[in-house]
Amino acid sequence: MSTYPNYSIIIPAYNESARIERAMYEVVSCVRKCGWSAELVVVDDGSSDDTAARVARFCADHPEARLLRNPGNRGKGYSVRNGLLHARGNVVMFTDADLSAPICEAQFLFDAIRDGADIAIGSRWLKRSRQTDRQPLYRQFFGRCFNLITRLVMNLPYADTQCGFKAFTRDAAQTVLQLQTIERWGFDPEILFIARKHGLRVAEVPVTWGHDERSRISYLRDGTQMLREIAIIRWNAMLGRYNRTPAPIARS
């Protein structure tokens, strides 16, 4: 691109050969339909299937898209950070490969940032009527319990910390993500905790959401790990690891 795009859309991908092409087509179609000046960056997290090859073929035919590869399998948190810190847009966002929130609803996040927010986060719980395919009851129960614990322990006032649909001004992303330490599922609360510590304005925005049965998260295994990571975040805060303001990274 000769000039920097207004928006960068990041998709972290690990062994997503079954759905990554559909996701990329939907994103590019939305970008063109909405007339956004935008790039799509797919971050391959050391996939053992042909995800990276599929993305590379797509990028060859779609100038809006590019592939970024992690040095091996590092986790979703690392993938999001790697993608957002190497994004070229003035506003940067990430969404999951299942596109549980329709990508065109990113406009709601962009509007919140235009209206003064530094970070806009999608929420499945502000308006539950917008959930088109709800999670099974056990997943809803564990998800809400985890969110409640997160809010209480970390003093986060958000109805939904875990929604994989978040946007940042470039400056906010550079500040928050360079201080991020959690590389796997528990990174969402950390970036919100850092944002509040640095006085950034976070707007929570209701979005349409459809549960994907292929979701890989395990509330027993990953939930336990996320609780450990909450403890790590509090420990990092006590040690002052989130206090500095990082220098911005130049755009490529």
Image (tube, helix red, strand yellow):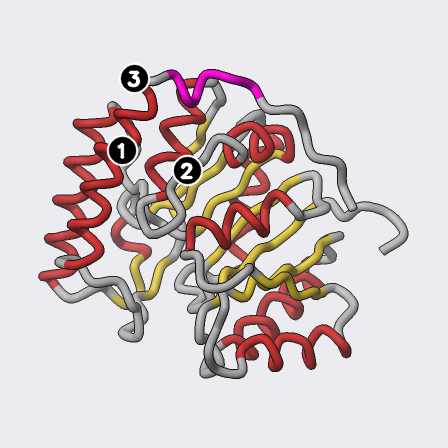
Residue 64, given in percent of the width and then of the height, sits at 74, 64
Check disc 3 and report the residue beneath it. Answer: 238
| Circle 3 Cα neighbour tier, 10 Å, few/some/many (<14 / 14–19 / ≥20) | few
Q: Position of residue 186 (x, y in %)?
A: 31, 45
| Residue furthest out toward the right | 2
Q: CA distance from mark 1 to mark 2?
A: 9 Å
Quadrant location of the N terminus in the rendered image = bottom right
Residues at marks 2 and 3 touching, judged by CB atoms closer than 8 Å: no
Q: Which mark is residue 90?
A: none
Boundaries of the magenta span? 240-245
Amino acid type at mark 2: Thr
Q: Is residue 166 magenta?
A: no
Which residue is located at x 75 percent, y 52 percent? 37
Q: Is residue 246 above or below residue 45?
A: above
What residue sits 66% from the left and 68% below the top? 28
Which residue is more in the foreground, 48 or 110?
48
Q: Residue at x 42, y 69 (%)?
A: 98
In the rendered structure, which amino acid carries the disc numbered 3? Answer: Met
Q: Secondary structure at mark 3?
A: helix
Disc 2, SS: loop
Labelled pair 3, 1 in contact (Cβ < 8 Å): no
Judging by the rendered image, the residue that carries numbered circle 1 is: 232
Q: Earlier in the sequence, mark 3 or mark 1?
A: 1
The kind of residue tagged 1 is: Ile
* CA gap, disc 2 and disc 3: 14 Å
Q: Earlier in the sequence, mark 1 or mark 2?
A: 2
Q: CA distance from mark 3 to mark 1?
A: 10 Å
Tell me which label, 2 or 3, sits earlier in the chain: 2
Query: Looking at the rendering, which quadrant does residue 92 occupy?
Result: top right
Say whether marks 1 and 2 touch (CB < 8 Å). Answer: yes
Q: Nearer the viewer, residue 162 or 229?
A: 229
Q: Which residue is mark 2?
A: 181
